[in-house]
Image (tube, helix red, strand yellow):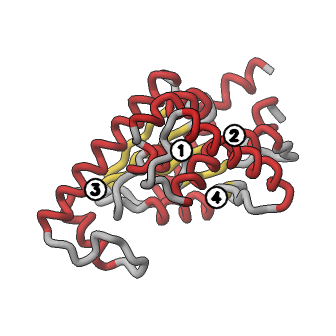
Amino acid sequence: MSPSAAKPRLVELAGPAGAGKSTVFRALVARDGTVEGRPSLRKREYAGVLASELLGVARTLLRDRAYLSRVTPEQIQMMAYLQALPRVLDRVDLAESRTLALDQGPIYLLTRRSLTNERLAAWRRRVVQTWAPLLDVVVWLDAPDAVLVERINARDKRHRLQGSPEETALKALRESRAVYERVLDELETDRPRWVVLRFDTSVRSAEEIADEVLAALDERETPVAQSA
């Protein structure tokens, strides 16, 4: 086993609503039994880590004067999760290699409007510097607007754009892409050699995408294995 196998490989699935992140995640799991979703920090073993990061978030909000009335429990939880998960991953000692596929990982969370407050700029920078070296592969999933709107309206899971006027939905999709690209640029500044794979899910199957993602992960491990 190579040294890199001691820690999980991290993949984030990103893209606008309706792009097929959940479908690709299921395909990854079906293709490779070592693929898992994001870990739950509600487990008792992680309670101390999460509690300390919640306190850390409270200190950040006070210090940076970002404790406006707009701050919500959801925002605090997202900030704490972004801070706590790297610590949890650092503590994990795996007997075999494992891949974590995150469909609501750091990239997704950093696009949330409540975390783009200018008063959180210093905090965002610290989070980006922490996460950029951890992600191995980012999978950007997208499709033509008409396809995304059709998928959103047909899905069982409720989404805020369901039933929206076409102009509203298209504007939201454009804005979503723009925010994602800004976050990718932020992260890429600290990780210029990471792998970003882009797919149009209207022409590529989830199974094909999963195979390419797993192949990219294997390629990233190959130089380490050869030098071991």
The amino acid type, in three-letter code, at marker 1 is Pro
Residue drawn at point x = 72 percent, y = 24 percent:
224
Q: Secondary structure at mark 1?
A: helix
- In the picture shown, does residue 165 fall above or below 21? below
Identify which amino acid the numbered label 3 is placed on: Ala
| Farthest-out residue, top | 227
Quarter of the image with the N terminus is: top right
Q: Residue at x 53, y 47 (%)?
A: 12
Local crowd size for mark 1, using a 10 Å CA cut-off: few (<14), some (14–19), many (≥20): many
Q: Are marks 2 and 4 in contact (CB under 8 Å)?
A: no
User: Relative to residue 158, is residue 216 depicted above or below?
Assistant: above
The mark that comes first in sequence, 1 or 2, is 2
In the picture shown, does residue 171 fall above or below 215?
A: below
Q: Amino acid type of disc 4?
A: Gly
Residue where numbered disc 2 is placed: 86
For marks 3 and 4, the one nearer the N-term is: 4
- The answer to whether one can see residue 86 in this image is yes
Q: Residue 153, which numbered label?
A: none
Is label 4 in contact with label 1 (beta carbons under 8 Å)? no
Q: Where does label 4 land, which residue?
A: 37
Q: Which residue is mark 3?
A: 143
> Which comes sooner in the sequence, label 3 or label 2?
2
The answer to whether any part of residue 212 appears in the image is no
